Image (spheres, rainbow, N blue to C red):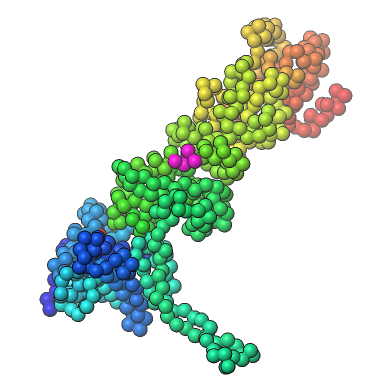
Amino acid sequence: MAKKQFKAESKRLLDMMINSIYTHQEIFLRELISNASDAIDKLAYLALTDQNVGMSREDFAIDLRADKKLGLLTVSDNGIGMSRDEMEQNLGTIARSGSLQFKQELDKDQTDVDIIGQFGVGFYAAFMVADTVTVLSKKYGETEAWMWQSSGADGYTVSPCEKTTVGTEVILKLKADSDDEKFSRFLEQYELQNLVKKYSDYIRYPIRMEMEKSRRKEVPEEEKDADKEPEWETYTELTTLNSMVPVWQKAKKDVSDEEYDGFYKDKFFDYEKPLAHIPVSVEGAVTYKALLYIPAKAPYDFYTKDYKKGLQLYSSGVMIMEHCEDLIPDHFRFVRGVVDTADLSLNISRELLQHNRQLSIISANLEKKIKQELLNMQKDRREDYEKFFAAFGRQLKYGVVADYGMHKDALQDLLLFWSAKEQKLVTLKEYVDAMPEAQKHIYFAAGESNARLAQLPQYQRLQEKGFDVLFMTEDVDEFVPRTLMNYAEKDFRNLATDDLDLSSEEEKKAAEAAAADWKDGLDFIKTSLDGKIVRAEVSADLGSHPVCLVPGGGMSFEMEKYFKRMNPDMPIPMEKVLQLNPEHPVVQKLRTLIAEDPEKAKQYAQVLYAQGLILADLPIEDAQAYTDLICGLL
Ligand code: ADP
Ligand code: MG
């Protein structure tokens, strides 16, 4: 029988399959099963209008059969089947099939095998694992059956064959095992079962296989002997491997919370039940279903590069991608879940997928749903929300800061900060709503711990005024107000670096006058400190404290420390400004000493500077000299 040749582009794809060093060989099974499912869809559809088909939904099935002796794996279906012409057209030409898009990728002269990624390449995937592929098929309504056979790139044959039932049987003669490739694993029942679970669990028809099982041997009553070990026997049973109906395809009202949670735990290997599940069903420009989860805890690798974000992407019940990153924005990368849409071809390539308009529509829509769910949780289940925030708040803050603050408006209402006044976490809205009339700004302080921050003289001053302060103790925190700039038209003021705008006009004038009046004194203090500060100044914001150290550059001490930690060799100038409270008795004493006893005044200046260091949580440069100094004065 004469061999027919594959069309040129088919041949190229075939070559790639045959010589593939491709790591996702196992997807061949998914491809064959989904073809079988498509063929059944067609006949099932026909049966709706054509009495003669004589089949109902329950009659359809896909069967797997493994013959270890002969090294054969068979996938058969009772779907529509193929005529002789269809076999030639559909199996001989890649352009006919849904692999068209893949072919277009190939035409761009893309030789890198990796473009296949995890995506399907259709029927030809069979050649990744098989030397010879034989397809027996009988088309519904025809009397003859046909056999298509190919051992790869050298062509294929089509000939008549015996087949009594309508449908298709694809028989793979698996490649021989080599040192690195054990093709025979595709004959093991547990391997096949796992692959079906992994890729084809939600195919709507049963995928069945004779499974070998074992059971206790039945022993007749009279032969029973308590001392004898029970005997086991093996038997085979036709077993359905897939669960068929995916949870996300069911109506929300038909699924209990337990079922939603159970699905999450199974699918995403989490022991803890999720804080929320979000079922989504959309019909419109893009029709899809999704089921999203908000985990209760961050996976151990969440804040590392090992963590893989993304949702599982299904096309009509068939998984085409395990971590589709484009479906979820980075700031919500903790969300787990699945998206299923019939609008994507199974054979779409990774590159095409990246620029896929449908995906961006889905992703934008899911982002809104997630945000809404989080806001609801924040409002109605505060405790859960705080748990969520403890796990993923840092990610949200990164999200605010990332991409030049592009997402800040979307994320700002999801943030929580520690309120010094309320002694609990509050949202920015709660903070602003609680602001007294006289308060014009949102005050925050960044540092190592709440206890430390509570020591800040500026904080005590604000406290006296009845103004709340947000305490920020995480690395990323201080960048958040810098990025947000303001909230509800109130700007953020950093206790450590910004003008707190607390004094009345008169007070300000008085301070200015005092400073002018005391210019020589301030210069004296600067000189006494040997270049440790860039200037000394008078401040009306210090409450009952004599002094305070503030950074001279735009960066707070906390931020400087953060950068130093990140990069210890980076020379960061810690420019310091010493602020003095002219009302404080010690400062007033210093003033008189400058005139009367400059030597003592110098010591006073040094002690006050050291106090500033302590309050700012900065190290005392020379602890020995400092203690000597204090003892001397005492
Ligand atoms: P796709 O499934 O995207 O169309 P494939 O390469 O997987 O591409 O399959 C090519 C074509 O071969 C299918 O479109 C279908 O017409 C035909 N085909 C493959 N397997 C079967 C089958 N089991 N029953 C009937 N037709 C099939
Ligand atoms: Mg297919």
* Residues drawn in magenta: 369-373
Quarter of the figure that contains the N terminus: bottom left
Is residue 255 in sight in this rendering? Answer: yes
Which residue appears at 53% of the width and 28% of the height?
482
Whether residue 18 is situated above or below residue 436 in the rendered picture: below
Figure quadrant of residue 518: top right
Figure quadrant of residue 318: bottom left
Q: Position of residue 441 (x, y in %)?
A: 58, 21
Callout count: 0
Whether residue 324 is situated above or below residue 408 in the rendered picture: below
Q: In the current view of this chain or complex, which residue is farthest to the bottom?
A: 223
Looking at the image, which is closer to me, 132 or 572?
132
Q: Is residue 58 left or right of residue 403?
A: left
Looking at the image, which is closer to me, 470 or 565?
470
Q: Position of residue 612 (x, y in %)?
A: 72, 25
Figure quadrant of residue 455: top right
Quarter of the figure that contains the C terminus: top right
Which residue appears at 66% of the width and 34% of the height?
424
Whether residue 300 is situated above or below residue 634 in the rendered picture: below
Looking at the image, which is closer to me, 535 or 114?
114
Q: In the current view of this chain or complex, which residue is farthest to the right?
A: 634
| Predominant SS of the magenta segment | helix
Looking at the image, which is closer to me, 34 or 107?
34
